[in-house]
Amino acid sequence: MGPIQLSYSTFGLTDLSFADALAAVDEAGYDGVELSFHRRQFNPFELDDDALAQVRRQLQRLRVKPACMATASHFFDPQRPHEPSLMSLDLAGRKRRIDLVRRGVRTARALGVPLVSFGSGFIRDEHVRHPGVDPGEVLADSIQQCLAEIGQGEDITLLVEPEPGMFIETIDQGLALVEAVGSPKFRLHVDLCHAWCSEHDIAGALARAAPLTRYLHVSDAPAGYNLKIASDAADLVFDLDFASVLVYFPDDAGFLLVDRRHPLHVADTPPDAARRRRIDALLARAGVDQAPVHVDYGNLHAGSSALDDEIFTYLISVPGLAFDVLERALPILAYLRGATCLPLVERRLANTLTGLAHFHEIPGEGVLDFASSFRTLADNGFSGYATVELYHHVASWRQALYHSHRHLAAVLAGARA
């Protein structure tokens, strides 16, 4: 088996100073550390030459090596991660993301980091409103502008990371984008949590990806309750064996949960005759013969709860709808998951192609088979860093840091045996 070395992302250590985060990763025994931009901890708009020199000197003193520069999906607006993206139709917004990635290249150059990673972004309502614009062309053009920051002969490679719900969601979509861009400086970043959420043939997908993959992210994932959100339309199609659907009615901002066990109509008022006919038609189309329960939207808990992180992570993965629609759905999701009452849905919310919940868990606390994934990647040509990314565990960072290392080091040792 080829060498896979363990790394940890500073994005899971944002309650520490950046210097303390680097020291903690080194102390825990990792081989590498991912340097992640962060508004409070490692802000590229505040990193002057002296600050970069200080980081460079610390890295020279430590055993741990810089593995990758992550350009911070949450950087601009923590409430709307990944926005604006490299495929945003608004030029000003798109240029902000291009500038951030280019700053990632410049920071990587200053610190001797060979890889710079980013995600494609999501199809948003702006793309739906402008169907004549090809988001793939917009994305490829933005990547070319980012690549222009890398000098001739420089050992820096840009990486795209497929992610559930994103325009580039699957490994094959990532490989197609690499081919379309056509630069040896542009390759693939595979997140194993994302891959298990998006690939029905995980071994085949990883085998195809391995030759063009330069970097891994690692976290675990639990089984989920797969739920799609879609606006009401004449051509709505349901496959409840794959996912339930929360249908949004634009005319009154109400919702219908199309689910075999728990069909619900959630709105400010009970349905009138026309809405009842539409509800009946949608449920019949989906094969649901149970009458829906009406839930008064105004009575739902709309405040914070212990489920906020899960629901937020789910909602940002839903493409094609306005953020106001997604945020209006939040109290409904909290109701389903039991924020203030017994849950109707026991499993974490998922918007994925396999039904696993895209919620980064500590390795060993989900259902992923890391041993087979590492073996497949190495057998097909991958070598490099596997970086643990646990941004949901910042408050319990020490447990996440050390438990992840123990678990994954044992997995790698067993795979090599």
Image (cartoon, rainbow, N blue to C red):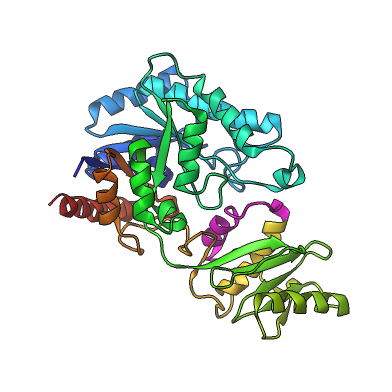
Q: Is residue 249 magenta?
A: no
Q: Position of residue 320 (x, y in %)?
A: 67, 51
Which residue lies at the image location 71% right of the left edge and 72% below the top edge?
A: 256
Residue 358, compared with residue 383, is above or below; it is below
Residue 321 is covered by the magenta coloring: yes
Left or right of 101 on screen, residue 57: left
Residue at the far bottom in the pictured view? 290
In-image side of 109 versus 101 (left or right)? left
Where residue 78 sits in the image (x, y, percent)?
Answer: 58, 45
x, y percentage for residue 187?
Answer: 42, 33
Give the image quarter of residue 342: bottom right
- Residue 216 can be seen in this image: no
What residue is drawn where x is 33% and y is 41%?
A: 210
- Residue 99 versus residue 64 in the image, above or below: above
> In the figure, 238 relative to 62: above or below?
below
* Residue 197, horizontal then vertical, whole percent: 45, 57
The residue sitting at the top extreme is 152
Q: Write down the region rendered in magenta.
A: 303-324
The residue positioned 71% from the left and 34% from the top of the image is 90
